[in-house]
Image: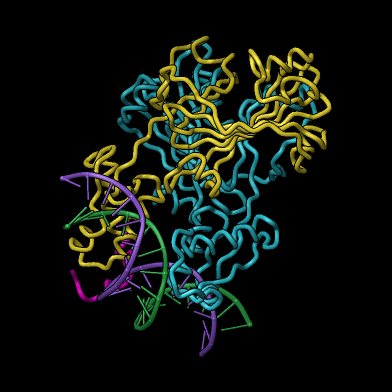
Chain colours: A yellow, B cyan, C purple, D green
Amino acid sequence: MSEVPVPHDSPIYRRIADGLRSRILSGELRDGDRLPGENALMADYGIARATARQALAVLINEGLAVPKRGSGVYVRLFKPIRRHGSRRLSREQWGQGHPIWDADTRGRPFTVDEVEVARERAAEEVAGVLDSGEVWVRRRRYSVDARPVQLATSYFPARLVEGSAITSPDTGPGGVYARLRDLGLSPAHFTEEVRARMPGPRETGLLDLPGGTPVIVITRTAYTSTGVPVELNEMVLDSAAYVLQYDFDA
Amino acid sequence: MSEVPVPHDSPIYRRIADGLRSRILSGELRDGDRLPGENALMADYGIARATARQALAVLINEGLAVPKRGSGVYVRLFKPIRRHGSRRLSREQWGQGHPIWDADTRGRPFTVDEVEVARERAAEEVAGVLDSGEVWVRRRRYSVDARPVQLATSYFPARLVEGSAITSPDTGPGGVYARLRDLGLSPAHFTEEVRARMPGPRETGLLDLPGGTPVIVITRTAYTSTGVPVELNEMVLDSAAYVLQYDFDA
DNA sequence: CAGTGGTCTAGACCACCAC
DNA sequence: TGGTGGTCTAGACCACTGA
């Protein structure tokens, strides 16, 4: 390599990352293929260890590659689940458009664990939405094929659900929505607020997220037909595992 | 510091990052505050430069902090714009629930630049959705308060829009949707597919994204009332600038 | 111009994984 | 057991920022 530092070009690590990225995006390197490792990059480009690591870190932070300890760095897979928002207006009713993203729609079941049910004092934002200072909280984790894909936390106004099965781990047939119906509190309207951000350490651990994986945060509020808020559900999704779909009319 | 390496604890850089993170989340360090810099961390913890950088990199990659060259590392702001999906069922019609996320709803105008209009051969996925191998493409960038927040690319089946103002940079009053209406192709149904991922270099540059900022990708397809796809719009949003809202009935 | 973050080198020891 | 990535040190030069 040139011993004289190049004046104003992009840094070495970035140019190396650019090269690897285009090999991935062009399809030369495919899902699961092994990238050149730190030692290979050091030899190929005559650079130090830290610089090679820096180049690979770029791709890892972009979510294009995943490091495997003691093994190598590999091109990442993207096999999302399709999550439907409003089904009622789904495209099957009025057209046969093709979805643009492939998604694993085969009906593999969710498994649930890390369940936790508790009565708590509501955080300020939660209290504001539910109009209630005391809430019942239901936390759980969903997995597909033993892979954790979603964390969910539901809040219910304590005074409305006190004594119902919603306050116990097993909610019985039909789940919490059936119990809300039993209480005369059937959800009729939903609003979902969707954001994306990088995960914190807890989320990284529980969802087993590799570097460079954002989470999608869906905050859904359920209202009865008379406008009473009955549930606030915050879902944290592995963004590499999901495509959200919403259908609606003009 | 202990000269003997601690056996199985988390690494130093991670513990330092944990400490800073809790100071941010607890509110001790607030929006825009300066974090201890590399030199301060080296002195405080008796560590090397690279280790201090690694600790700060954790927070930067989580999107909690933003580095300013020659100045310092600062706690990041989050002031989103609220983007409504289906307005027709918006909560104002049936209830007065509070949104959980604060959002800048004041009507600051978008500005548009980086406009590009071209006729192109459609990529495979685009052709599949629009049923058309040739498309007119409209690219542009939206900014709010001089801050770029969204890149958008719209595709139109060439045979349907040929000769209309959709093929010229200035589409006239009402924009492309008015022109589609003129052609008897009013959009009546929409489907949106929402994903999140880390940005590539082009997106990082055009949106001026700091590290640790995912993008939200919305792929919206517009159909006429008879189910003919007339537009495919791919929007790439700065996730730190947006909250998406969708309202629908049970 | 002093301090900051950005890049880079040349070493070291470790845990983990596959062969 | 050899190669991989994970962590860490101790230096260096640079470009940029702000007082």
* Above or below, comparing residue A125 to residue A233 in the picture: below
* Above or below, comparing residue B11 to residue D10 in the picture: above
From the viewer's side, name the closer residue of B51 and B149.
B51
Q: Judge whether residue B99 is colored magenta.
A: no
Q: Is residue B145 left or right of residue A241?
A: right
Q: Is residue A84 visible?
A: yes
Where residue A196 appears, as percent x and y from the top left, is 55, 41
Where residue B38 appears, as percent x and y from the top left, is 51, 72
Q: How many marks?
A: 0
Where residue B145 appears, as percent x and y from the top left, is 62, 52
Q: Judge whether residue A5 is colored magenta.
A: yes
Q: Quadrant of residue A98?
A: top left
From the viewer's side, name the closer residue of B241 and B175.
B241
Residue ID at (64%, 14%): A174
Q: Is residue B107 visible?
A: no
Residue ID at (79%, 38%): A128
Residue ID at (58%, 71%): B36
Write down the region rendered in magenta: A1-14
Where residue C9 appears, as percent x and y from the top left, is 27, 74
From the viewer's side, name the closer residue of B94 and B66.
B66
- The C terminus of chain B lies in quadrant: top right
Q: Is residue A90 left or right of residue A192?
A: left
From the viewer's side, name the closer residue of A68 and B112.
A68
Q: Is residue B106 left or right of residue B22?
A: right
Q: Quadrant of residue D5?
A: bottom left
Helix, strand or loop: magenta stretch = loop
